[in-house]
């Protein structure tokens, strides 16, 4: 299991997905709360200055540079208005109060800058680590079949026809692996660039499964394979190429993670309330490791048992393709054992077919 | 190939020298004569001068888009064209087939597959409009008598089902795009009504395939069309 996002300061420092507007709101609420609390506590006004300072520094751990500065400004105004006598008015500050205020701003500014710097650094190093891991696995995955090709090519000069035949098999396996890898890298890139628009067309699930199966035939050799399609299975709208790749990736994934010779099943149908069709790929392998739940569909994640390597892109592409078509994909441990990945797609009725 | 007959000539238009070398190796071993052109322009003038029996055309040429070469070629020549391309998107396959290509292979391709496609294209050239009957598996189709049998028992097909079967037979081995089949069977207004096709194909497979869920003869080219293989 490759772990890329180690638990980091970043997660603590910044809640994920916080927008700038939310940060400003958070800051305002916090300062308002401190101010309100201060109305009920009898303390000297310089003490309140320090409490505000504490609040601003605490905020600087959570929000970015500009909201911190904003917090410093509104807390200074609130302090002056509510706590410096004459209260409930903007007082002209005495020299030592002004000094306190000045120090206060400098501290808030430095704290804001520093925490922002730490966060950016954390993010960069996480990205650098991701790149390193990606580069490591890409070079491993590309160079292994390339070295097979190179050494097989050199040995093709042999006169032994049996050896030549087995070299040809190795070459063809290596090219298959390279082809699959390049295909997945391209798919992932297309998904991320947003250049991928599904071309929805009426699909027959049998066509999709057959095409997917043919494309990974070599990897499924020696496995019992059964497809279940109900007789009244309707047509549904999907992008046939995307679905073919998605199902092929699920089949390949199952083949990589289960012992050779164990069976694979593809089960399709319509959900009981008939709003969605489903296509499930099930195996009788060891099932899904608990620690992989939740990260299964993230890119560059691979199970330990993946003896044939790979980049960990397969399931991420499956999800990307399925989501692009308005569906979802779910991984389960069914009661009969093994693992089951189910693709759900919305479906509506097609128009009539002209009579003859 | 019968002894003594002149070799069939294949023109390869591709700018990658290594691809041309490997194609030469493959084609000459299979007893074809091969000529080559590096650019679209050179390819077009080669076709005009040499009249090759078939063309293998790469879509990514340095001077002209391959599709443009195909369009210009189709203005005056019916020579069979096999497209080679790195583009595996269905859209580009459909565009090439609808522009008059006879078949499409994506790189990387196997030499066995290339030769098989080429054979189909060239056979069609020789037997154009002469297909009177076809046999696949336990199915026999007699186009002159409009008779279809399975294990020598007549199979009842509706008029449309038979038309679809006939279209696939006269183009056997070749992929027909949805658009081509739909406009042939239902007219140009049926464009985009692919569910007609799915349903008719399902019916044909049920009547003529051993295992309709895993068809051997009536094959689907995902997102592109259908092909009848022997």
Image (tube, coloured by chain):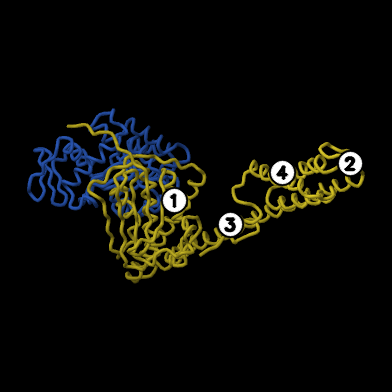
Q: Nearer the viewer, mark 3 or mark 2?
A: 2
Q: Is residue A275 above or below residue A138?
A: above
Instruction: Report which residue position mark 3 lands on.
Output: A131
Picture disc at residue A319: 1
In the rendering, at what x and y percent does residue B89 appear?
Answer: 40, 43
Does mark 2 fall on the same chain as mark 1?
Answer: yes
Q: Colour of chain B?
A: blue
Kindly check if marks 1 and 4 are in contact, taking CB atoms under 8 A apart as contact: no
Does mark 2 fall on the same chain as mark 3?
Answer: yes
Q: Of B34 and A271, which appears nearest the observer? A: A271
- Rounded to the nearest whole Å, what is the CA distance between mark 2 and mark 4? 22 Å
Instruction: Report which residue position mark 4 lands on.
Output: A32
For marks 2 and 4 on the same chain, the one whose residue lies earlier in the sequence: 4
Chain of the residue displaying label 1: A
Under circle 4, the secondary element is: helix
Chain of the residue displaying label 3: A
Q: Nearer the viewer, mark 3 or mark 4?
A: 4
Q: Residue furthest right?
A: A95
For marks 3 and 4 on the same chain, the one whose residue lies earlier in the sequence: 4
Instruction: Report which residue position mark 2 lands on.
Output: A93
Mark yes or no: residue B6 visible.
Answer: no
Q: Nearer the viewer, mark 1 or mark 4?
A: 4
Q: Choose top left, top right, bottom left or bottom right for residue B66.
A: top left
Lateral position of residue A345 relative to residue A300, left or right: left
Does mark 4 fall on the same chain as mark 2?
Answer: yes
- The chain that appears yellow in the image is A
């Amino acid at each position: 299991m490759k772990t890329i996002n180690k638990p980091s300061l970043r997660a603590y420092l910044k809640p994920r997905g916080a927008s700038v507007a939310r940060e400003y709101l958070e800051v305002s609420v916090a300062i308002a709360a401190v101010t309100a609390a201060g109305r009920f506590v009898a303390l000297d006004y310089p003490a309140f200055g320090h409490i505000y300072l504490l609040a601003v520094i605490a905020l600087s751990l959570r929000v970015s540079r500009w909201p911190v500065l904003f917090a410093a400004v509104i807390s200074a105004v609130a302090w002056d208005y509510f706590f410096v006598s004459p209260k409930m008015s903007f007082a002209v500050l005495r020299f030592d109060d002004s000094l306190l205020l000045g120090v206060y701003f400098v501290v808030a500014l430095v704290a804001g800058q520093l925490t922002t710097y730490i966060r950016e650094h954390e993010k960069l190093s996480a990205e650098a680590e991701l790149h390193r891991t990606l580069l490591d696995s890409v070079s491993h995955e590309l160079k292994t079949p390339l070295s097979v090709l190179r050494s097989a090519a050199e040995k093709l000069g042999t006169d032994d026809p049996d050896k030549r035949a087995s070299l040809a098999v190795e070459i063809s396996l290596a090219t298959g692996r390279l082809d699959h890898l390049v295909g997945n890298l391209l798919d992932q890139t297309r998904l991320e660039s947003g250049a991928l628009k599904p071309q929805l067309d009426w699909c027959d699930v049998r066509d999709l499964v057959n095409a997917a199966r043919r494309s990974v035939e070599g990897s499924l050799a020696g496995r019992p394979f059964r497809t279940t399609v109900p007789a009244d299975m309707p047509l549904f709208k999907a992008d046939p190429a995307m679905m073919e790749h998605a199902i092929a990736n699920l089949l390949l994934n199952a083949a990589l993670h289960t012992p050779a010779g164990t069976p694979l099943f593809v089960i399709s149908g319509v959900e009981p309330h008939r709003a969605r069709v489903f296509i499930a790929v099930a195996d009788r392998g060891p099932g899904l490791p608990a620690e992989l739940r939740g990260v299964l569909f993230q890119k560059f994640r691979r199970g330990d048992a993946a003896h044939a390597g790979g980049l960990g892109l397969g399931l991420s592409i499956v999800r990307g393709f399925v989501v692009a078509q308005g569906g979802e994909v779910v991984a389960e441990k069914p009661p009969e054992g093994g693992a089951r990945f189910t693709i759900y797609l919305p479906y509506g009725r097609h128009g009539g077919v002209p009579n003859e | 190939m019968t002894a003594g007959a002149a070799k069939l000539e294949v023109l390869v238009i591709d700018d990658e020298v290594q691809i041309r070398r490997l194609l030469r190796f493959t084609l000459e071993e299979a007893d074809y004569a091969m000529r080559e052109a590096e650019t679209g322009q050179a390819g077009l003038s080669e076709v005009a001068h040499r009249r090759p029996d078939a063309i293998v055309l790469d879509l990514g040429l340095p001077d002209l888009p391959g599709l443009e070469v195909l369009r210009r070629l189709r203005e005056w020549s019916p020579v069979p064209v096999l497209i080679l391309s790195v583009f595996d998107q269905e859209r580009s396959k459909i565009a090439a087939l609808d522009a008059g290509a006879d078949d499409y292979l994506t790189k990387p391709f196997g030499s066995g597959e290339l030769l098989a496609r080429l054979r189909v294209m060239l056979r069609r050239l020789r037997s154009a409009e002469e297909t009177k009957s076809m046999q696949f598996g336990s199915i026999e189709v007699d186009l002159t008598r409009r008779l279809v049998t399975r294990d020598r028992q007549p199979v009842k097909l509706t008029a449309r089902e038979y038309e679809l079967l006939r279209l696939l037979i006269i183009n056997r081995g070749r992929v027909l795009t949805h658009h081509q089949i739909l406009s042939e069977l239902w007219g140009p207004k049926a464009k985009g009504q692919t569910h007609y096709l799915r349903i008719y194909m399902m019916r044909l497979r049920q009547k003529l395939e051993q295992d309709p869920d895993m068809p051997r003869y009536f094959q689907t080219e995902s997102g592109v069309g259908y092909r009848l293989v022997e």
